[in-house]
Image: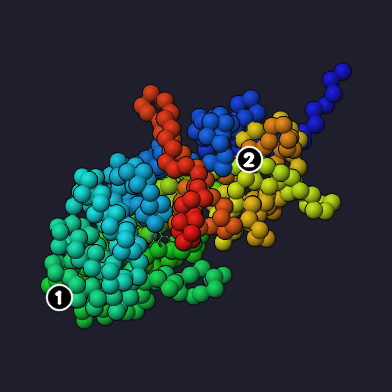
Amino acid sequence: MTTPHIRNRYTDLIHQTFFFPRHGFEINDNKLFFQGIDLNELAKEYGTPLKFTYLPKIGSQIEKIKKLFNDAIKKYDYKGNYNYCYCTKSSHFEFILNEVLKYDADLETSSAFDLTIVKKLHSEGRFDKSKFIVCNGYKTQQYVKNISELVTAGFENIICVLDNREEFDLVDKYATKTTKIGIRIATEEEPNFLIYTSRMGMSYKHVLDLYKNKIHDNPKFKLKMVHFFVNSGIRDTTYFWSELTRLVNVYCDLKEECPELDTLDIGGGMPIYTSLGVEFDYAYMIDQIVFYTKTICENRGVKMPDIFTEFGSFTVGESGGILYTVIGEKEQNDKEKWYMIDSSFITTLPDTWGIGQKFILLAANHWDKEFQRINLGGLTCDSQDFYNSDTNSNQVFMPKNTASDPLLIGFFHTGAYQESLGGYGGIQHCLIPAPKHLIIDKDENGEFSYKVFAEEQKSDGMLKILGY
Ligand SMILES: Cc1ncc(COP(=O)(O)O)c(C=O)c1O
């Protein structure tokens, strides 16, 4: 007689909770593979904590969205083009920009120093003067000077998006050649948000005035773009669709006055998979964006605009991951068991600490072991340096640990914003070092290549910053 199989192994939990395997995750001999990469081998070879970037994901994301927009444009006979801009602030690293530009994306910038990256890329022949640069963000004098310098140098498609009415005077002061500008319209926040109207952009009530009084008769400027960004992202909600349609109508109001206007930038916010338990219908969302824009423009008798997006998380988020080893266990009471990781959440995944962001979290080994509810603790002495709830459940389960073969865990789709927020290569909480960072690529034959971008941070560098 066979004993009935008790389904309390980690593998049972994952297979029962999610459709698995999916999104490039699979299990082989109770070991986790990501995009075909054996994570246990990776940890053995390079050690942990280990950040990694899987470059091919960047190109596939860009191509996916371009295709979906172009399909919808064809389906609805939409009379305008689509442009994919990459929002550089989500990851400024050279290896990311390099990959993004291979897929012919344009750029969206947020501050003065972003434009020094553009200059550098151009000087190395990697960024053509005809490419689009959408300059968002609050304009400091230095930012405006850098924009003007690029316009003067012949970057013909740099668009300075005005965040507020006063900014126009600053831009006017430094502009030497005809400058393309955009206007950012403030979106209304979701009803449950602490603020009614976004701090970014200007109220639509001021837009026509600004155009008529300052831009219309000024030969130095061409108003080309209306920009908005719905903060909570592109979601299939009544709120998103009502903001989209309201703002397409604002575009039409302005287009009736300004024939040069030809572009609508709908910002960033395309969601990514931060959990195995959700599903996004990207094709449907994009189909509807194109459909609504066309229908409103047709009804208003206005020529359809070119549509721009500025996806940050979507471009780089799913390319990143981080592996930690569980280096100790603590049991503080009957119910709370802690697995201590060999780094810190506050320093390496600051979004988990700052805004309660969840990421895909999976054990990389011991899938055949029993699971238990645990809390994950970081190395800093900050009481908030922990991770103990997933998107789907307010708890985290992991296989039982063994001292002889410690548990390896991975957080995935962490490629956007974490270094920009946590700082990179500087001083961090409790002097926990920045982890080693590995870049992984794959050639046409499916062969992986690995390059260490940065070794784990050393104490020498930190002491120098601290003045020792
Ligand atoms: C103006 C603007 N565009 C694009 C983005 C990118 O957003 P996401 O990373 O959600 O795509 C941001 C992010 O804050 C933004 O402020």
Dot 2 or dot 1, earlier in sequence: 1
Of all residues, the one furthest to the right in this rendering is 1
Q: In which quarter of the image is ligand 1?
A: bottom left
* Figure coloring: rainbow
* Residue 447, percent from left and from top: 42, 25
- Which residue is under mark 1? 218
Spatial CA distance of label 2 from label 1 is: 61 Å
Mark 1 is on which residue type? Asn
Mark 2 is on which residue type? Thr
Is any atom of residue 154 visible in this view? yes
Q: Which residue does the image show at 31% across and 71% down from the upper left?
A: 140
- Which residue is under mark 2? 325
* Residue 209, percent from left and from top: 26, 80
Circle 2 — which element? strand
Circle 1 — which element? loop
Residue 374 marker: none
> Left of 110 or right of it: where is 284?
right
